[in-house]
Amino acid sequence: MAGRAVTAALRRRHPGLVVAHIDAVARMWSPYKNIYRSGYIRLVDKHPHLWRHLYEDTNRRHSTLAHLVTRAAGNGLVRLTRRWDPDVILCTHFLAPELLYRPIAKGKIRAPLHVVITDHDTHRSWNWPGVERYYVASDLVKSRLALTYGVERDAIDVTGIPIRPEFGEPTDRTPVRLRYGLDAERPTVLFLSGGFAAGAMGKAIHGIWRERRDAQILAVCGRNERMRRRVERLARPAGGVLHALGFVQDVRGLMEVADVVVAKSGGITTSECMAVGRPMVISGSIPGQEERNADAVVEAGAGYKALTPEEVRHRVGQLLDDPDLRAAVARRAARFGRPEAAAQVADRVAAAIEPADLPTGPRFHGAR
């Protein structure tokens, strides 16, 4: 999502550049790619304590064996990058700099390497030799990167985490309210399903209704159709409004009509919520980077942790019952948000290319 956001900003703001957005994992050797994706999901979902151990262990040192396997599996990405011969490489995932720093050091790839860190944290997996510039979420992340890994502060720009441009644009709430039959005079709570099982989400929703029978609930269940059906079947109080949604494109519109957002603390989700200026109740965090994201939101006064359905009920009720508190948290969220992050990163990446080197048309893809 961060890569797409910067790609769109580059194309919009710097149309003279030729831009490609490449999924590094998709270019890996197939067995590695499948294990990489399914293994991560299984670890964080079923074995979070094992994931925490792995996260902390790899933060102390790079694994030589894992690095050699990754390099062997990533030759396709390296070959593609060499054929493309870009002027700048911008990475929004830590796998790409691990694969590309060595060919750059050997002169096989001539482009400087820029990296966007997409959490309110730093980890050794982002830190590889030869990275020319980093783009980070906050001054605290900048200090961690400089003090922990010795990165020069002048090589670190505080831009925020890139998100889609619509999160920084004014929008009309009326169409979304009409689409879901929402009453502007009643409070609306948006659930984003990450971090919830269906039963826990249902328990949290019922708990909110015990506090505020007038609460309107929007529950986004993503591609988990089983969860969506279970939430859809929840018993409602008289006049209760509940929409159980699958995968949706217009998260921006849903956040805009919500008074409170309940979600886990992914880097993109927290950045989007802050950009819209919505109080956040954090319902779950993957050990490691997402815990740091949650800490950043709470430290900014822009939300609360609520790791059980009962705590979600308490925190959401607290915010809905106290309009002054809700407004204050929303203001702090808006101050913490950086909706212009993608544009800032795009402009600084474009500035790294000397004007004399800007192509007048494609200089690769067979047209060189």
Image (cartoon, rainbow, N blue to C red):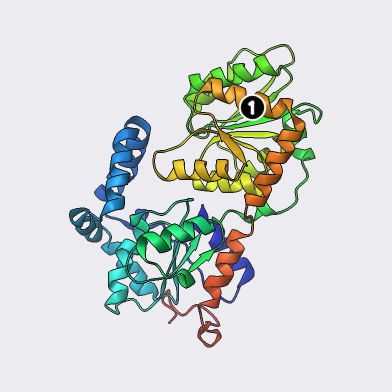
Residue lying at the far left of the rendered structure: 65
Q: Secondary structure at mark 1?
A: helix
Q: Is residue 175 above or below residue 342?
A: above
Q: Is residue 314 left or right of residue 239?
A: left
Q: Nearer the viewer, residue 3 or 52?
A: 52
Residue 245 lies, in percent from the top left, at: 59, 30
Q: Nearer the viewer, residue 325 or 95?
A: 325
Residue type indicated by callout 1 = Val
Res 79 → quadrant: bottom left
Residue lying at the far bottom of the rendered structure: 356
Q: Nearer the viewer, residue 40 or 49?
A: 49
Viewport quadrant of the C terminus:
bottom left
Residue 148 lies, in percent from the top left, at: 37, 59
Report which residue position mark 1 lands on.
316
Q: Is residue 211 above or below residue 24?
A: above
Residue at (32, 67) in percent of width and height: 100
Residue at (68, 48) in percent of width and height: 334
Marker count (numbered): 1
Q: Is residue 153 left or right of residue 240?
A: left
Residue lying at the far front of the rendered structure: 147
Q: Is residue 8 left or right of residue 98?
A: right
Asked whether residue 3 appears in the rendered view, the answer is: yes
Asked whether residue 276 appears in the rendered view, the answer is: no
Residue 141 lies, in percent from the top left, at: 48, 56
Res 89 → quadrant: bottom left
Residue at (34, 56) in percent of width and height: 124
Q: Is residue 142 above or below residue 202?
A: below
Q: Is residue 240 above or below residue 88?
A: above
